[in-house]
Every structure is written in structure tokens, then in C-alpha cells.
Image (tube, rainbow, N blue to C red):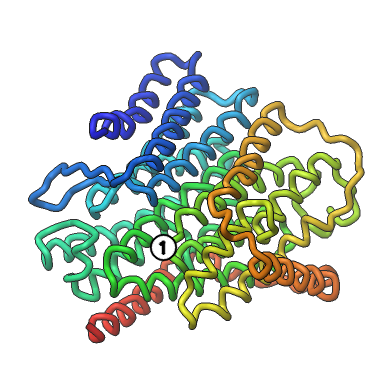
Amino acid sequence: MNIITISWIGLPFFVGFVIYLLPQLDKYLAMFAALASALYAFQLFALPAPVNLELLDRFGVTLAVDRLSAYFILTNALVTVAVILYCWHSGKTAFFYAQTIIVHGSLNSAFACTDFISLYVALEVSGIAAFLLIAYPRTDRSIWVALRYLFVSNTAMLFYLVGAVLVYKASYSFSFAGLGKAPPEAVALIFVGLLVKGGIFVSGLWLPLTHSESETPVSALLSGIVVKAGVYPLVKCALMVEQIDPIVRVFGVGTALLGVFYAVFEKDAKRMLAFHTVSQLGFILAAPEVGGFYALTHGLVKSSLFLIAGALPSRNLKDLQYKPIDSRIWMALAIASFSISGFPMLSGFGAKVLTMKNLVPWQVIGMNVAALGTAISFAKFIFLPRGGEQHQAKPGFWPATIILLVGLFVANFIYYDAYNIGNIAKPLVTIALGWWAYGLFFQKSVLKLPRMLEQFEHLIGFMSLCLILLFWMALGSTNLQ
């Protein structure tokens, strides 16, 4: 299994290089690498024990893949397959497919890392490749958004790298487990880097503009899987180091509430989805023990929603209330919206039930409020008028969307124990209350929240404030030991 694992990690990078040599096979080679990852993920679910690879044992540089990794790897594979299918007849160049598969490979590597140095390399590679995808249209707007993303990302990773050095100084190892012996400033520096990369809490306010202004398939890739490269290490550290768990849970609740607060008032469809990416990442962090299943569900539903948003006649939700949309597109939009709201028979239901069951008492009220806000937000899509003229979607739209939506139905069976009267009743009541609140107030609301906090000149300032907050949280956690 070790040889298979090494081959799986190296395959996307090899394929990315070969695509430049054989550009006429670009999409076929990219699809092959993504499908290989899906097969590897399914194999991981069947293994009785994790696979561990020691690269530099003396320094704690190791790779490990287990059931948690399998959820993230499978999400990466399915989202990448959908994006490639969406772009199949779009005329994208070999450069686009090469960068897509390099993003895919670097994310696979991040989901196998259990040390801060290997993770640093994986995050940097994914960041550069994502930057190139965001800038792919080569317009002034896309280049500015891409450079903004790269600057914020690289600044965050400088903090992270200093923190990794402090961990080694304290424990003579770069392993995630070394956080248990690291000083508070090391925890703060590493976590602020990961919070920024993951688009979490106020450190993630770069995300709405970046994801909403990117091309449709790039938005799907960014929100569906790229941000999870910063989320996975946080979940892993929470599971490995006891004193880290409360910090991760606090940021889970905070980002869930922050994202949904903006989303319920947002009038732009893609920006609303971007803010909900921030919010849904909070659900993954709020219950680290079951974060893998929620990550899979979120990746499938958010990628499908961004692809569907690209097929709508307008991004303005107010305009869409007076423009009936194609019934087929509305059906796809409704299925995805029902899933993320927690409706039974879709994987979002099981993911939300499982998450709520693994919260600690102080989290319950906040996460229920976030769930209610999710129902309010996606009522905007569910109650759009339908029956308009049939829309000629891009040739790859339906194959890509169907794969993701079918995944929501199939993944629903992962946690079939969720189906009892109590578990079914609570999400239905939450959704009903959300729809009632939407019809009574939010549908007619003209309130528009200011975007000042998202401005470039404020992003590094928020990163610094988050660093201070993390330091005091880590210091308090250390004093309690």
C-alpha cells in the first residue's frame, strides 16, 4: 500500500507535466488523474488501519492517510472530475487543465500531511496554481483578484512558517503533535496562516470577492475543495492535540455565524454562495470528529451550486424574482439548496445531524442559529419563479452537475442511522422557520451590508487582530493544562 500511496501522490504532478508535452490529450489525462484519486479514496475506506509513510523520521516529517483523509480526497476527486467535465467543450487550453490537476495533486498531498513542513510545501503549490487559474482570463479584473489572493495567501504563510520553526524548536519535530509542547505564539502563528488559507472567520474575508469574481468552474473548484486545504490541518490538529480542540471549535462557531450573517442579506447569487462557503467551513470545524463527512457533503453541494449559478440569467437575486428560470435548472438548484439546508434524503441532512450530535453544550445555540440562517439564505433560490424559456446550458454543465447531485443522494447512506423521528423533525422545523422568516422579512429586505471589511487594505489588519486573539486563546489553553 505504501507504493500505491507514493504513486498516487506523484501521479497528478507527472500528469500535469505530460499535459504540456501532449496538449491534445489534456482533458483526458486530467480526467485519468482525478479518477485515480477517487479509486484511491474508496480503497482507503476499506482499509482497517491508517497508512503511514516516514519521510524524514528524525524531523517528524511523515505522511498518513486514514478515513478522515479519505473523505477529503474523495471530495477533491469528485469536484475535479465535475470541473473537467464542465470545461470539456469550452475550449480551455492545456495550461488550464495542467494547473487544475496540479491544484488537485497539491491538495491530495495536503490531505496526507501530518507535519508542518510537508504541509507548507503543499499549500504553497496549491496557492500558486490557484492564482494562475483565477488569473486565467487575463482581464484586468481577474489579474487584480488573483494578485490580491496571492498577496494575502503568501503573507499568511510567512506567519505559518515562523510558527512551524517555533514548533520544531520546542519539540525537535515538525509533526502536528508537536503543537502540544509548542509555545502559544507558535500555535497563534500557525493557526492564523491556516485560517487565512481556509477562508475562516475575519481572516477569510478575502474569500467572497475572490470566489465570486472567478470564472464559474474556478469558483466551483475554490469553494468546493481548495479552501479545505486550510481546514483539514485544523481538524487534524484538534483530533491529535487535546488543548487545540476548544480553539478550533470556537472558530467553527464564529465563522459559521459570521458567514451566514452576511449571506442572509446578500443580493448577489455568487457572493451569497461565497459567504456560505465561509459559514459551512464553520460546521466542519465545529465538530472535528465528524468533519470529514461534512467536508464531502459541502464540497459536492457548493461546487454544484456555483456551476448552477453560472447558468442563471442573472446574478442579482432581486432581478431573478421577476425572471422565471428554466424548470430543469431550477430543479437542480432546488436539490442542492435542499441538501445544504439539511433536508432528509440528501447527504446534507445526515451531515448536519451528525455534526449537531457531536457539539459540546456551549456550541449548540450558535450552530442552530447558523442552521436557521442557512435555511433563510437558500430559500432565496428555492422560491425563485420557474417555468421560463429553456436555457441552453454549456455542453458540460449537465454531466458535471448530475455527478455532483447524484453524489448528494449516494452519500446520504453514509449515516443512515440519522433517520429517526426526532432527527427528521428538527431539520424540517428549522427549514420551515427559515422559509417563514424569508417570506415575512428577508424577501422584501433592501438592507445592504457594507463591503468595507473586505477591502484589500483591511485584510492584513484583520489577520493581525486574529493573530492577537489566537495568542490569548492559546495562552489560556496552555495555562489550563
Quick check: 473 above or below 92?
A: below
Taking the spot 76% from the left edge, 51% from the top edge, the residue there is 334
Q: Position of residue 451 (x, y in %)?
A: 62, 68
Q: Position of residue 64 (x, y in %)?
A: 27, 46
Foreground of the two, 99 or 333: 333
The crowding category of the residue bearing disc 1, from other C-alpha atoms within 10 Å (few below 14, some 14 to 19, many at least 20), is: some
Residue 42 visible, this angle: yes
Judge left or right: residue 59 versus residue 190.
left
Amino acid, disc 1: Glu
Foreground of the two, 278 or 459: 278
Circle 1 sits in a helix, a strand or a loop, which is it? helix
Circle 1 residue: 289
Say which quadrant the C terminus sits in: bottom left
Q: Position of residue 47 (x, y in %)?
A: 34, 41
Q: Position of residue 272 (x, y in %)?
A: 67, 59
Taking the spot 83% from the left edge, 68% from the top edge, the residue there is 443
Q: Based on the displayed image, in which of its 4 quarters is residue 192 positioned?
A: bottom left
Q: Based on the displayed image, in which of its 4 quarters is residue 356 positioned?
A: bottom right
Say which quadrant the N terminus sits in: top left
